[in-house]
Amino acid sequence: MENVYLNDQAVQRFVEIQQRLSKRVVLQELLDEHVNLIGGMDVTYVNDFALGVLVVLDRSLNLVSVYCSEKKVTFPYVPGLLAFRELPVLLDCFFKAKKQGQVPDIVFLDGQGIAHPRRLGIASHFGILVNLPTIGVAKKRLYGVCKNEPLLGFPEPLLDRNGDVLGYCYIPKPRASPVYISPGHLCDPESALRVTTKMFRGYKLPEPTRLAHHYTQLLRLEKLRKQQ
DNA sequence: GCGACAG
DNA sequence: ATCTTGTCGC
């Protein structure tokens, strides 16, 4: 069920959905005092299954809770269409948290926000669907260019073809490759940078996504152990 | 036509 | 993302 191929017409259908949704993305200042409960999400894969995690942290970055979900994968990985592959399992995690009355004030996702060909990376798409501020922190670049190479602790603007700032390329740790920070929804590039730089604790990734990735790997080991 | 291409 | 060991360095 994983060998799903998308022909050009199918790709175009999803691209049009993104173009329509991207008009709903709101870029605005996000105040620090509105960031108390912090969410972080990630997804891993085991054969045909996607395993998702939502971690919730308090403003001191202490872990408050972990929500997880498992879904069969029904969409292939296509650069630019990542959200259609990962959103199902992520939304399920989010709804579990919501049922517990534990909705984060902001959510960090592993991937791009508006630093995307149609300004609708997975962080923006998720933010629109749940109506929450989101920030995307990706380990690789997808779209946009930097004028210079970033230096440790000195963000370098990530620009689109018109010179508009999409986000920032940033090296949080010595000898680490940069991460790409961009606002998803209800946030702007400057706020995304300011809030995200407060989330680093000595690792390449900010605590919300780093912890989400950690729990996702634990789930993966558990899943592999059960089926062998 | 040739690269680039989140996870 | 995943497949995978050792190794350099603090």
Image: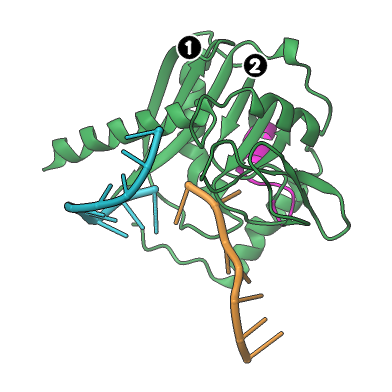
Chain colours: A green, B orange, C cyan
Element on which disc 2 rests: loop
Secondary structure, mark 1, is loop
Residue A196 highlighted magenta (yes or no): no
- The three-letter amino acid code for the residue at tag 2 is Asp
**Figure check: A164 above or below A185:** below
Left or right: A222 in relation to A100: left
Q: Which range of residues does the magenta coloring cover? A: A116-128
> Where does label 2 land, which residue?
A105
- Residue A148 position within the rendered picture, expressed as x and y whole percent measured from the top left: 75, 55
Please tell me the numbered disc located at residue A221: none
Give the residue at x 53% y 8%. A101
Of tags 2 and 1, the one toward the viewer is: 1
Are the residues under badges 2 and 1 in a single subunit?
Answer: yes
Left or right side of B4 for A72? left
Q: Quadrant of the C terminus of chain A?
A: top left
Q: Position of residue B5 (x, y in %)?
A: 57, 62
Circle 2 Cα neighbour tier, 10 Å, few/some/many (<14 / 14–19 / ≥20): some
Report x, y in % for residue A149. Answer: 69, 54
Is residue A132 visible in this depiction of the protein?
Answer: no
The verdict on residue A122 being magenta is: yes
Camera-nearest residue between A64 and A19: A64
Q: Judge by depth and name the residue closer to the eye, A27 or A7.
A: A27
> Residue A25: where, in percent of width, then height?
78, 37
Mark 1: amino acid: Asn
| Residue at 59% over, 46% down | A178
Exactly how many numbered labels are in the figure? 2
Quadrant hosting residue A224: top left
Does residue A213 appear to the left or right of A107 in the view shown?
left
Q: Which residue is mark 1?
A: A62
Judge whether A183 appears above or below C5 on screen. above
